[in-house]
Every structure is written in structure tokens, then in C-alpha cells.
Amino acid sequence: MASYTKPDDDQVLVEQKSSTRVIILNRTRQLNALSFYMVSRLLEIFLEDEGNPDIKLVIMKGNGRAFCAGGDVSAVVRDVKGGDWRLGAKFFENEFKLNYLMATYSKPQVSILNGIVMGGGAGASIHGRFRVATEKTVFAMPETELGLFPDVGSSYFLSRLPGFFGEYVGLIGARLDGAEMLTCGLATHFVPSSKLPLLEESLYKVENNDATAVSAIIDKYSEQPSLKEDSVYHSRMDAINRCFSRKTVEEILYYLEMEAMNNKADNWASATIQTLKKASPTSLKVFLKLIRKARLQGVGQCLVTDYRVVCHVLQGRYSKDFFEGCRAILIDKDRKPKWEPSRLELVSDSDVDGYFSKLDDEGWKDLELPERLNNLPPYVISKL
């Protein structure tokens, strides 16, 4: 990936403020999209700081108008098309290891989500202990429109949202604001952006890794925002649960169509149907199976499964939708992907099951997660 060329050290800025490590994503023209260098550097920093007794707290934020808009999947596609799908797999291997490390970190991580947080940006923040949203936050997992699937262990945290809101968010790539993130549990706090400098200055004074003390500091600057009147979380949860609790994507669409017929004055159901029909049929079916399995799995197993699935996606044996989606959305930008298979009924259960199998490829092996410490805090142990 462009990432395999000489790395740009300025893509990740690292500071130390007393006992606090501050990590700043700094690829502003690309909305801080994660390059291979950035993922590798973040993994290195988190591993080093966990063993550094001088570091008690980690703050992550992004320069510009984004925390992080996701992984640099265009670079992944260029590498895979260059000859070896394993080059792309190496990016995801390091990214998923980083996600696991963040999810099981022994020190509190505070992610300041003052802007766009999507895809890989969610993986680099939501797994951490504290997620601070603001009035500028925009969250989404838009992978199904790219022919990919919500990865980075998102099946773990989306499956833990109330009801079947996680299925809704992951399947249609719904955009949530900061208030919605806080209400559904994706964010732990909401702090107005004008108060962030004061919050950060207070966090720099932390002298130990006590998560309760960190939470109390953030609480001082936090507010309880009101949901907008048209928020789906405010007005659509009953319908979301009725529709997105179904066993198959086809059934979800059927029940959405019933909602649309029974409430013609409201276009929410019909708009949701249109969004689903634009997404890759394969991606929709793969993600629905992922999130249903994730309800009974720990975060590590979710990431191991994600890695299997993404390796199949990169290999392109069952479908090349990821490459077509990137062409249509990110490269040519005609926004007219030609999915293959083109309809839900053409995606067989056996094809979907195939994405969850070990790859029959010489030298390939399952994701090997970083070894963890024995004295992890209770909120981490609950994820394992």
C-alpha cells in the first residue's frame, strides 16, 4: 500500500503530558484514514506503553474534522490488484491485533471523537474504555455499500447495543450523531467541543490508571444532550426491533415492506429498504451472520472470525464485490457498483458459510492475538 513505501512519521503524532500518552492521528487530507504505517505504529505504541510504568492513561484524537474516517481501503485494493492478496491481509492482521489490544488494554484509553468516526476509526476507539462524543461527531459503519462488511470487531460492540439496533446500524451504514452514540452506548460521555481543551488539561494531571478516577474527571465536563426529534433512536426503535430481529436479510426486507405499507405517510421504512437494496447482497448476508454469532462470542473470537472473512474477501473466490465497491465509490465515483451475485436470492447459505471457514491456502493461518496480561481490570475481563 502506499503504506509499504517510505512511511510518513507525521501521520501519527505522539506526545507525553506528565503520565498521559497523547496520540494524534494526523493525516488530515484523507480524514485520518488509517494507512499501513499508522496501524503498525499505533500497535507499536500501545504495546510499548502497556509495559511503561510512567504511562497511566492514553488519549487518542484526530487533527482536522475527523477522528478517523476508516482504514485506507483504496490502498489495500491497489496492493491486492498488484498481485498478492496477502499484502492486503497484512494490513487487516495488524489492524485487528491493534483492536484486540485496545479492547483488552490494562490502562484506560480516552478517545475524543470530535468529528467523523467510521469503519476502522470505530475499531480504534469504541473498543477503548472511554469514548467522548461531541456535537460534531458523526459515526457510521458504511462497509456494506463498499462490498466489504463492518469489521474491526464491530460485530462485538454492535451486538451489545440495545435490541437489534446493532443490526440496523451495521446493515444499512446508519449515521449517528454524538447524542445518539451516547444514548445507545457507543459513547460513554458527551462533552461539548468547546470544553475539550479543559478536559484534556485535567486528564494530563492523572497520576494513576484508575478508570474510576478518569471517569470522574470526564464527568465534570459532560452533558446529557437531547436526541433530535427525528432521531431513529428516539422514534424508530420499535420498528427497528420488529424488522431487524428477523433471521435472514430477506425477512428483514419483507418486514420493512410491511412497515412501509402500514405507514405510508412515513418514509423511514421505504428509505431503509432502498439503502439495503443498494448494498452488496453478499456483504449483507455475511454481516448478519457475523453479528448473530458475535452475541455469544468474546471480542477476541469476533476478531479472529473477522480475519477469516476478510481474507476470503481479499482472495475473491466467492465474490469480488469489495473491489467493485471500491471502484464505484472511491475510485471512479460513479456510485453504480455491479454486484455479483446481484440479488440476495443468488447468495447461497453455503457461500456465506464459506467465508467463515479456514482458508485452503499454503502458509495461511488464523489471526494470532497478542498475549495479554494476567492482572487485567474487570471491565476488560468481561470482554474475553
Image (cartoon, helix red, strand yellow):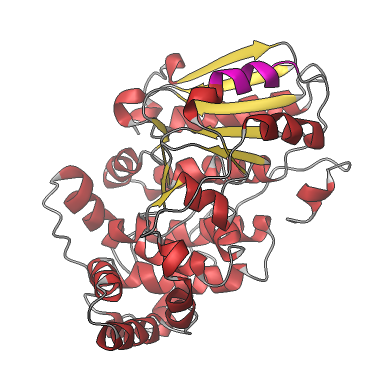
Specify the principal SS of the magenta part. Answer: helix
Q: On the picture, is 84 further left or further right than 212?
A: left
Residue 153 seen in this snapshot: no
Seen from the viewer's position, the closer of residues 59 and 215 is: 215
Seen from the viewer's position, the closer of residues 358 and 291 is: 291
Seen from the viewer's position, the closer of residues 130 and 330 is: 130
Query: Residue 23: where, in percent of width, then height?
Result: 57, 22
Residue at coordinates 67% horizontally, 71% vertically from top-left?
Answer: 296
Q: Is residue 202 magenta?
A: yes
Residue at coordinates 30% horizontally, 67% vertically from top-left?
Answer: 319
Residue at coordinates 88% horizontally, 41% vertically from top-left?
Answer: 375
Q: Is residue 208 magenta?
A: no
Which contiguous range is marked in magenta?
A: 197-205
Seen from the viewer's position, the closer of residues 29 and 353 is: 29
Residue 287 seen in this snapshot: yes
Corner quadrant of residue 57: top right
Residue at coordinates 47% horizontally, 71% vertically from top-left?
Answer: 237
In the figure, 375 relative to 184: above or below? above
Q: On the picture, is 123 further left or further right than 346?
A: right
Query: Residue 351: where, in percent of width, then height?
Result: 40, 78
Corner quadrant of residue 118: top left
In the figure, 363 relative to 237: above or below? above
